[in-house]
Amino acid sequence: MLPEDCISTILSFTSPEDAFRSSLVSSAFRSAVDSDMVWERFLPSDYPEIVLSSVTPLNFSSRKQLFQLLCDPVVIDGGNKIFKLEKSSGKKSYILSAKELSITWSYNPLYWSWIPMAESRFSRVAVLRTTDWLEIRGHISTQMLTPNSSYGAYLIFKISDSAYGLDLMPAEVAVEVGNQQVSYSSVFLQHQESKKKQMEMRKSKEGKYQGIVRERDDGWMEIEVGEFFSGENDEEVKMSLVEVKGCHLKGGLVIEGIEVRPKH
């Protein structure tokens, strides 16, 4: 049997999923897996900043315990973002709250209102009262994400029972990395009752695929804004959903935020 520190060194070059599995092999492996050496490599390099920015103090006695804590959503940055690690890979994901987004006319009470909602993890969500100009933009630095990884960006939202005008014209969704557009399509923000219509991936006249609205495990809905690859350089990722061509009024859209998570 190899010395415990050798086993720990070997495991640190695998993945969190492999490490968890190997702990079932024997007591020696279990002890090696618990080593801080293993989990220091699986934790992101900026984990001290994440811990400090957590709204609720994170209490842990080992790097493994900290990794497990970060695999559950952690509210950070004064309550404006949520951070989470993917348990199998250790890759980072974020949810940017509606307050972190740029929403046209969102602070004009004629068009949007900001309200607390029990189902939300954030203190306020943005509720569209009425507008003929729907424009939602968000951005994140690739430096905040796991390098050399594929990511998807997803708008998290709900549709109120009194919603109107959201299914009359497709919205344009796009992702840019640096100054290059890497993803573009059109989507309908349809009502939840229109699920049969939503579950088909339809091709538009322009040849762009229209996205599918999906129900999330947390009770919200999401639609993919686009996907991108985070390289090793620090670049700005710009995400957008825009519907300004219809010139008709629409309302009843509730925005919680945009999630950026690993895509497999």
Image (cartoon, rainbow, N blue to C red):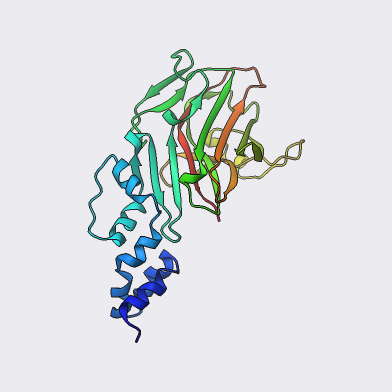
Q: Nearer the viewer, residue 242 or 234?
A: 234
> Height in image: 12 above or below 80?
below
Residue 139 lies, with reference to residue 90, above or below; the image says above
Residue at screen point 35% across, 36% down: 77
How many discs appear?
A: 0
Q: Is residue 180 visible?
A: yes
Above or below: residue 103 compared with residue 3: above
Which residue appears at 39% of the width and 22% of the height?
114
Which residue is situated farthest in the bottom direction here? 1
Residue extending farthest to the front is 233
| Closer to the camera in the image, 52 or 221 | 52
Q: Where is residue 225 shown, x and y percent of the image?
A: 58, 39
Q: In x, y percent, where is residue 116?
A: 34, 27
Quarter occupied by the C terminus: bottom right
Question: Quarter-wise, where is residue 95 in the image?
Answer: top left
Q: Quadrant of residue 135?
A: top right
Left or right of 193 on screen, residue 10 = left
Placement of 237 over or under 264, stated as above or below? above
The residue at 65%/17% (across/down) is 247
The answer to which of 8 and 138 lies nearer the viewer is 8
Q: Note whether residue 216 is visible.
A: no
In this view, which residue lies farthest toward the top? 110
Q: Quadrant of the N terminus?
A: bottom left
Residue at left offset 58%, top offset 31%: 241
The spot of residue 181 in percent (x, y) is 66, 38
Q: Position of residue 162 (x, y in %)?
A: 48, 23
